[in-house]
Image: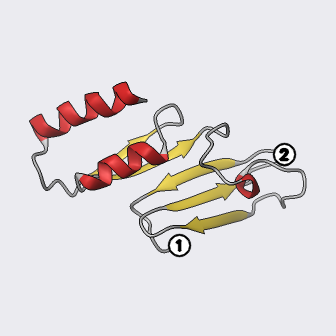
C-alpha cells in the first residue's frame, strides 16, 4: 500500500496543489483507512469499497448469516463513515467514505 500512497502523493502535488477539495473513488484493491487518512491531509475525500480481509474493519461489519438481507450497518468516526450493506445472505459490501460524514 506504500506504493499507492507514493504514487498518489506525486500525482496530487503535480496536478492538485495544496488545497484540492476534490473527491476520489477507489475499488476494493486500493481502499484503506491509511490511504483515506493520508488523502484527507491533502483535503482530498475518498469513497470506495473495501476488501473484507482488512484489519481495520470491525467484525460486526463482516458477512454473517445472522444479518438481515437488504440491511445496512453504519459506523462513524470523526472523519470517516463505514457502511456494511447485505445484498444477499452471507454477503456484505463494505464501503469507506470520508465524503459522507453523517449518515
- Residue 94 on image: x %, y %: 62, 49
Q: Residue at x 18, y 39 (%)?
A: 12
Mark 1 lies on a secondary structure that is: loop
Position of 11 with respect to 27 (left or right) is: left
Q: Compared with residue 85, is residue 74 higher up or lower down, i.e. above or below? A: below
Position of 23 with respect to 60 (left or right) is: left
Q: Residue at x 31, y 55 (%)?
A: 40
- Indicate which disc residue 103 carries: 1
Residue nearer the viewer, 50 or 53: 53
At label 1, counting other C-alpha atoms closer than 10 Å, the crowd grade (few under 14, some 14-19, many 20 or more) is few
Position of 65 with respect to 55 (left or right) is: right
Q: Residue at x 22, y 51 (%)?
A: 42
- Residue 37 on image: x %, y %: 38, 51
- Residue 26 on image: x %, y %: 43, 39
At label 2, counting other C-alpha atoms closer than 10 Å, the crowd grade (few under 14, some 14-19, many 20 or more) is some
Mark 2 lies on a secondary structure that is: loop
For the N terminus, which image quadrant? top left
Residue pointed to by mark 2: 90
Specify the quadrant of the image occupied by residue 11: top left
Amino acid at each position: 500500500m506504500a506504493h499507492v500512497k507514493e504514487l498518489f502523493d506525486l500525482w496530487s502535488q503535480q496536478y492538485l496543489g495544496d488545497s484540492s477539495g476534490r473527491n476520489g473513488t477507489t475499488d476494493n484493491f486500493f481502499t484503506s483507512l491509511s490511504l483515506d487518512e493520508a488523502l484527507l491531509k491533502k483535503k482530498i475525500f475518498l469513497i470506495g469499497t473495501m476488501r473484507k480481509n482488512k484489519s481495520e474493519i470491525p467484525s460486526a461489519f463482516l458477512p454473517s448469516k445472522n444479518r438481515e438481507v437488504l440491511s445496512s450497518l453504519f459506523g462513524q468516526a470523526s472523519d470517516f463513515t463505514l457502511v456494511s450493506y447485505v445484498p444477499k445472505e452471507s454477503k456484505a459490501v463494505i464501503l469507506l467514505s470520508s465524503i459522507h460524514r453523517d449518515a
